[in-house]
């Protein structure tokens, strides 16, 4: 069964006010995705997934029994899946499709990031592990998206977001984020339909806050979905070989139900294999000691504290997510005081905080400018952003409370780590007392004088891997 009837329903549901424009023979879109030309052999664990055919929209009456006698079929399909059998995604339930397509606002608005409990799941829970289905936050764009990770196991940075692809590049999913001044959604929509000439638009739909475009590019099919808020556009593009249509059709519906361009709540961050990773560190002594996120320092061949020099990792506390670095040499260190004030009231366990850090260079055109993000901390040390923002390169950022006191350090946890320790939130606060105890354990002389400008204690940490 071809998947475009589902796309038609999807487009119609988004177009409650505007009309659906079917542009035959038009060309599209603005972010052509590069083809992953990898010729590596597909590991056994990453063999292409297979899916049963989708039920027709209007099934015909039951046919008469065949003349040749056959054995009676069981009343229900066998639920068990053989360990040696290929991973199979269950058929997309029609009621699930209707539930997804009837609620386009759940994708465009941040207040409805989760599928209502009354809606049946599209990916059966017993198949989540085999299928590799995971809803993650893309740190480069800030969107939340459901990914079939066993279908697209390769992740890497893209020009405006992140790209996930299959072993041979026949399926690609790419997120994007645009913040150009004066950006108009309608202009972007029209540009998607014109460029490049190798794309033929079959369906297109424009709303006040979102658009959808789909069609054919050469021998491939594509779809683009995007939403706008406060002049910022976020979305994703899916590109796949027509031969993969039977696999991708149910995946597209599942992705549509989970996609949230401006989410309110955190999800585990997507895992990226990056040869160079950026984060933050806090200078905590006049001798060049720096505390940072332990995840950032894993597998580094070289660690650099930008503006201070090469750094050596001298200690780590995996349980608390901390790593201790040391920069040697006559650097101009401005340490952040970790000394406790016995006369001060204890810091509240929850409340508003400001995260101060240096994002990934790609997020600010290569500069190392400090950025503030408003957030809130709960009793469980979970950090929830006041407004959805990309967090690429923000691990190890400093957190300050309303009174400007140092409250701790932000730790970002990706999907793999979150699955190992599900009790820990994706973005959490490592509190000051935990950092202070870590430094005392490793005999780090704490700065006694309060730094008048705590922002000077925040430095960019660069991890270089092979």
Image (cartoon, rainbow, N blue to C red):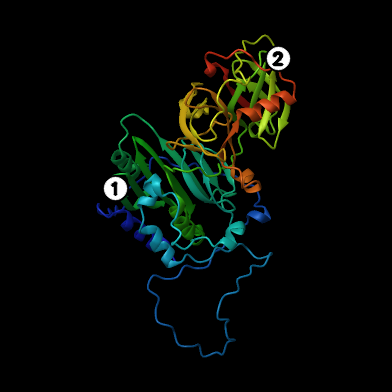
The residue nearer to you, when weighing 361 against 356, is 356
Residue at which label 2 appears: 328
Could you tell whether 18 is left or right of 320 in the image? left
Check residue 7 in the rendering and tell me which mark sits there, or answer none: none
Nearer mark to the viewer, of 2 and 1:
2
Q: Secondary structure at mark 2?
A: loop
Where the C terminus falls, by quadrant? top right
The residue nearer to you, when weighing 261 against 177, is 261
The residue nearer to you, when weighing 186 against 448, is 448
Residue at which label 1 appears: 207
> Which residue does the image show at 44% across and 38% down from the upper left?
388
Mark 2 closeness class: few <14, some 14–19, many ≥20 residues within 10 Å: some
Q: CA distance from mark 2 to mark 1?
A: 57 Å
Residue 44 x %, y % = 68, 56
Would you place residue 282 above or below residue 101 in this image? above
Mark 1 closeness class: few <14, some 14–19, many ≥20 residues within 10 Å: some
| Residue 300 visible in the picture | yes
Q: Earlier in the sequence, mark 2 or mark 1?
A: 1
Could you tell whether 53 is left or right of 297 in the image? left
Q: Secondary structure at mark 1?
A: loop
* Quadrant hosting residue 156: top right
Where the N terminus falls, by quadrant? bottom left
């Amino acid at each position: 069964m071809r998947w475009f009837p589902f796309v038609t329903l999807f487009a119609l549901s988004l177009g409650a006010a505007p009309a659906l424009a079917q542009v035959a023979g038009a060309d599209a879109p603005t972010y052509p995705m590069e083809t992953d030309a990898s010729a590596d052999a597909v590991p056994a664990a990453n063999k292409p997934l297979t899916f049963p055919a989708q039920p027709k929209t209007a099934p015909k009456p039951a046919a008469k029994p065949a003349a040749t006698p056959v054995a009676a079929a069981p009343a229900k399909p066998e639920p068990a899946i053989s360990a040696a059998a290929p991973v199979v995604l269950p058929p997309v339930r029609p009621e699930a499709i209707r539930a997804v397509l009837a609620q386009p606002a759940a994708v465009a608005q941040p207040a409805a990031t989760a599928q209502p409990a009354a809606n049946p799941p599209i990916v059966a829970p017993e198949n989540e592990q085999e299928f590799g289905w995971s809803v993650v936050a893309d740190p480069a764009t800030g969107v939340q998206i459901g990914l079939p990770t066993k279908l697209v196991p390769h992740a890497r940075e893209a020009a405006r977001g992140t790209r996930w692809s299959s072993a041979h590049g026949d399926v690609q999913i790419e997120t994007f984020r645009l913040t150009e001044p004066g950006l108009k959604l309608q202009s972007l929509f029209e540009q998607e339909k014109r460029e490049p000439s190798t794309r033929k638009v079959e369906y297109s739909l424009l709303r006040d806050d979102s658009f959808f475009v789909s069609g054919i590019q050469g021998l491939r099919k594509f779809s683009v979905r995007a939403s706008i808020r406060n002049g910022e556009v976020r979305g994703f593009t899916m590109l796949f070989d027509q031969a993969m249509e039977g696999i991708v059709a149910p995946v597209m519906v599942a992705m549509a139900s989970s996609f949230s361009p401006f989410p309110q709540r955190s999800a585990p961050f997507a895992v990226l294999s990056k040869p160079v990773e950026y984060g933050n560190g806090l200078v905590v002594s006049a001798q060049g000691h720096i505390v940072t996120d332990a995840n950032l320092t894993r597998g580094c061949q070289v660690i650099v504290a930008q503006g201070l020099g090469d750094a050596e990792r001298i200690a780590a506390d995996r349980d608390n997510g901390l790593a201790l670095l040391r920069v040697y040499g006559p650097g101009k260190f401005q340490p952040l005081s970790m000394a406790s004030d016995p006369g001060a009231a204890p810091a509240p366990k929850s409340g508003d905080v400001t995260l101060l850090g240096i994002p990934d260079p790609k997020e600010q055109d290569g500069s190392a400018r400090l950025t503030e993000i408003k957030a809130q901390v709960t009793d469980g040390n979970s950090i929830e952003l006041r407004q959805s923002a990309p967090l690429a390169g923000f691990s190890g950022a400093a957190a300050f409370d309303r009174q400007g006191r140092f409250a701790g350090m932000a730790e970002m946890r990706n999907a793999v780590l979150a699955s190992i320790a599900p009790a820990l939130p994706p973005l959490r606060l490592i509190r000051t007392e935990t950092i202070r105890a870590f430094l005392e354990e490793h005999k780090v002389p704490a700065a006694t004088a309060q730094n008048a400008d705590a922002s000077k204690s925040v430095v960019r940490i660069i991890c270089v891997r092979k």
